Image (cartoon, grey):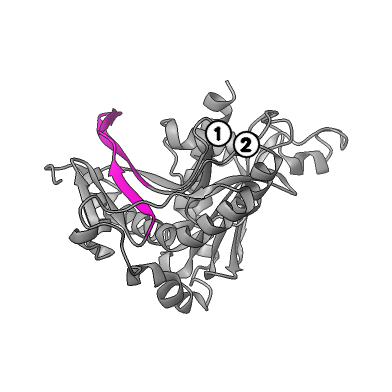
Amino acid sequence: MTEQGDPGLDAVEHVYAQMQIDDEWSVFEPRGFTWWGHHLAQRVWAERPRDSFGMDVVRVHAETRLVRDVQPGDETWKLLNFLNHDASLSSLVFDAARGTIVFECSVFVHEQNVEWLKWLFMHAVAIQAAEAGGRAALLARELEGEIDVSEHPSSGQRPEPDDMLNVIRDVYYPNSQAPPPLTQREFQAALDIGPRSDVLANAGDGGLTAEFPFLGDVPAIGMALGYRSADAAPESALLMMSIERYPRLGYGVLARLVLPNGACDRDQAEARLNLAETTNWTACHLLGGWCLSNLGLTFVTFVPTAACWPGVPVFLFQTMGSRVRWVRDEWMA
């Protein structure tokens, strides 16, 4: 697969090597591979490079097919929303036209970020593969769909699961029993990367909050200070980042981006956004998923301690800022 200087193929090959995937259960393509950890196929591939301000940028995907023959309806939307409410680094994406549900994550890599971003992407791919079997069984049972079982074209159906599918039990959960060693300095660094006039924010040892202009320029705190009537709806998108503990993954950094009410008044806006993020050139990494929470339309990302590094608050802050711009300027247009 290697092409000289292609960061996308570098990320793909990194996943294959670090996850110790067996050739016997893999099928290769020019810019990626599909492998069977057990009965479900996971495909990892890189799109062709695109020029962005004179730099080659490549979107790299990982997708696991979970369930087919699913009908759209209230129960489908409710269950997917419930599961994406606790998203980690992948989104459950429903394509109503095809009746399929897949696990999806993706990153945009280039020569300046590939050396560290390929590691986070590898964690996302591993967690996706490990969670896929349980998610598929639940979705098929509750939605009366069919688990999207497949087999290797020459090796056949894999009789026993790859030990890598136990990575949450063996690696992530044991290594995430203590909070990530992040302090106010790391969260403050996230707030120092952009123009402060555009974002109202604060940071502490436990995380940060920030408000990005969305429907207007007055943040929610501005309403509390009397700049707008208390009866008016907030106009800003709210980012909350904190150190939390997930039951299945242990401690990590939870980031939630909440859009203001009225930002996306479309039926199943959360499902539509999840699907749009897999097909559109968003320039913001799809690591997590959209849901409707008690706060509103929300994008959720959780990075477990085992996948954290000191720069994760900066990375999440930049990604969420890009997502705000994409939803506001392109998806809502």
Name which of mark 1 and mark 2 comes first in the sequence.
2
Q: Quadrant of residue 273?
A: top right
Identify the element where label 1 is drawn. Answer: loop
Residue 243, given in percent of the width and then of the height, sits at 58, 66
Magenta stretch: give its range.
39-62
- For this orientation, the residue located farthest to the top is 333
What residue does disc 1 label?
96
| Three-letter amino acid code of the residue under disc 1 | Ala
Q: How many marks?
A: 2
Above or below: residue 83 compared with residue 204: above
Above or below: residue 95 compared with residue 19: above
Q: Nearer the viewer, residue 325 or 6?
A: 6
Residue 92, given in percent of the width and then of the height, sits at 52, 47
| Three-letter amino acid code of the residue under disc 2 | Pro
Residues at discs 1 and 2 in contact (Cβ within 8 Å): yes
What residue does disc 2 label?
72
10 Å crowding of disc 2: few (<14), some (14-19), many (20+): some
Q: Quadrant of residue 19?
A: bottom left
